[in-house]
């Protein structure tokens, strides 16, 4: 019980401790937020479509996880392989999103890229809380 309380305290301090409120958004989020709104919408739509597909697979995956956990004898190698397959799917989805973002940036004119870089610089000075979450 004491370890639970200590862990909770450390977690709260880590998440909400001094200096946490004034950090800029993580790089990947800043790259996304600095994009023009129409590009962000396209990326959001693609992400939501990928999430729907992953959700459909995820319900099957959860059933498989439960089955693997209940198996007698438990096969840690099969369980690990299943987790690795899930991680590979997440990695593929992330790679598709990064490629889509790259293609959006590559299609920008020189002036558009400079404006994008300026918006990115502006985001780097903002707090992690609501103001940058448009």
Image (cartoon, rainbow, N blue to C red):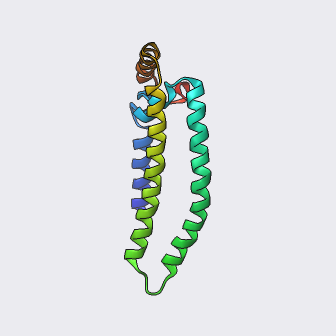
Left or right, residue 121 beside residue 36: left
For the residue pair 91 and 3, the one nearer the viewer reads as 91
Quadrant for the C terminus, please: top right
For the residue pair 42 and 16, the one nearer the viewer reads as 42
Measuring from the top left, give residue 91's x and y in whole percent: 43, 51
Residue with the most extreme top position: 111
Residue 81, quarter of the rendered image: bottom left
Number of labels in the image equals 0
Q: Is residue 128 visible?
A: no
**Residue drawn at (62%, 59%) of the image:** 56
Residue 43, quarter of the rendered image: top right
**Residue drawn at (47%, 16%) of the image:** 112
Quadrant for the N terminus, please: bottom left
**Residue drawn at (56%, 67%) of the image:** 62
Q: Is residue 32 visible?
A: yes
Residue with the most extreme bottom position: 72
Left or right, residue 109 beside residue 130: left
**Residue drawn at (39%, 69%) of the image:** 80
Measuring from the top left, give residue 85's x and y in whole percent: 44, 63
């Amino acid at each position: 019980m004491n370890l639970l309380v200590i862990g909770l305290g450390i977690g709260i301090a880590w998440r909400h401790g001094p200096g946490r409120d004034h950090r800029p958004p993580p790089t990947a989020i800043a790259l996304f937020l600095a994009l023009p709104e129409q590009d962000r919408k396209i990326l959001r739509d693609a992400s939501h479509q990928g999430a729907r597909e992953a959700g459909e697979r995820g319900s099957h995956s959860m059933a498989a996880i439960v089955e693997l956990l209940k198996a007698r004898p438990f096969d840690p190698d099969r369980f690990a392989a299943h987790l690795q397959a899930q991680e590979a799917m997440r990695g593929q989805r992330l790679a598709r999103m990064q490629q889509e973002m790259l293609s959006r940036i590559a299609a920008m004119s020189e002036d558009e890229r400079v404006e994008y870089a300026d918006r990115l610089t502006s985001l780097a000075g903002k707090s992690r809380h609501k103001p940058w979450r448009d």
